[in-house]
Amino acid sequence: MKTMLKRKLYKVGFIILSLISVAVASGSVSNSKKPVTIPPVSNKTGTHQFDSSGLCTCIPFIIKDEQLKAPRIQLHKNAATFVKEYMKKNGFFLGKTKHRIAPYFTMIDSVFNQHKLPVELKYLAYVESGLQHNLISRSGAVGPWALMPVAAKEYGLSISKQQDERLDYYKSSTAAARLLTDLFAKYGDWLLVIAAYNCGPGGVQKAIKRSGSRNYWALQNLLPEETRKHVKKFIAVHYYFEGHGSLATMTKAETEKHIREVEAYVSQQEEKKKTDSLAVVL
C-alpha cells in the first residue's frame, strides 16, 4: 500500500510540476510582446513602437504565420526611389559609422524618452551633422543638431566666445527635443516637423497656404529643394538603421490610417481567438 501511495504521489507531483512548467512557459510567451494601448494620434508618444520586423507593438502576441498578415508601415511611393538609391549609395559609409555613433544614439534615446518623443527622430541629427561634434555650416548652424543661434538661445543654450552649448551633445539634444515638441504641437505631423526644422516654420506655413493642404506629400513641391531632400534623407537613414518605418516617417493621415488598420487587425485576432476557444469547448 505504501509503495502504491508513493507512486500515486509521484504521479500527482509530476503532473503538477508539468502544469506549472506549461503555465510559466505560456506566460513568458504571451508576455514576450505585451499589448499596449494605442494612443490618440494627436499625442507624441513612445508607446506606439515597432519591433525588429516592423510589427507594431500595439498588436498582442500572435503566431508566426499570422504575422505576415499584420499591418505594417509602407514606404511612401514619393520617397521609395530616393530611399533605395540613397541606401545603395551610402550604405557602406553608414555601416562604418554605426559603432562611432551608437553611444550618441543611446543618449538621444534617453533624452527623447523623457520628452515623450519618438526616439527614431534621432536620425535627424545624423542627417543634420553626421553627429559630428564641431560641425559649423555656412548658414551659422552649429553642433550635432545644427542649431541656429536664435533657436539655440530660445531653447536654453548659452552661446558666447568662451562657450557654445550647441557643441554639447546632451544639452543640444535637450534643446532639439524641446524645439521638435513645439513644432509637433504646431503641425501634428512629423514630416512637416522635419521640413520646418530644416527651412523654418515660415517656409512650411507658406507651402501650406499656397497648397491649401497640410499633407506633406501634397505640398512638398512648394518647399525648397534642399528641404525636400532633407526629409527624404531622414526617411532613408531611418530605414537603413531600423529596416522599416515608424510614426516619424508618416504624415498625420498615414498615421491615422495605420492605427485604424492596427485596431481592426487586433479586433480580428481577438474575435478569432474567441471563436477558436469556443470551438475547443464544444
Image (cartoon, rainbow, N blue to C red):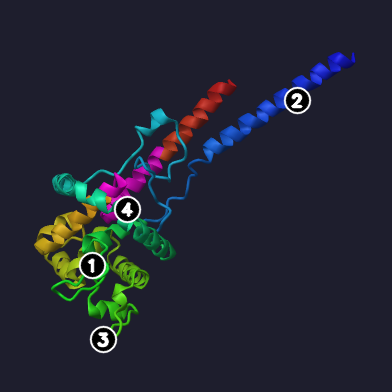
Q: Quadrant of residue 134?
A: bottom left
**Which of the numbered marks, if any, corresponds to residue 161?**
3
- Label 1 Cα neighbours within 10 Å, binned few <14 / some 14-19 / many ≥20: many
Report which residue position mark 2 lands on.
13
Identity of the amino acid at label 2?
Gly
Which residue is identified by label 4?
Answer: 99
Name the N-terminal-most of marks 1 and 2: 2
Give the position of the N terminus as an image quadrant: top right
Q: Residue furthest bottom?
A: 161
> Earlier along the polypeptide chain: callout 3 or callout 4?
4
Secondary structure at numbered mark 1: helix
Determine whether label 3 and label 2 are within 8 Å by CB. Answer: no
Q: Secondary structure at mark 2?
A: helix
Q: Give how far apart the Cα atoms at labels 1 and 2 are.
A: 65 Å
Q: Which residues are magenta?
A: 240-265
- Label 4 is placed on what type of residue? His
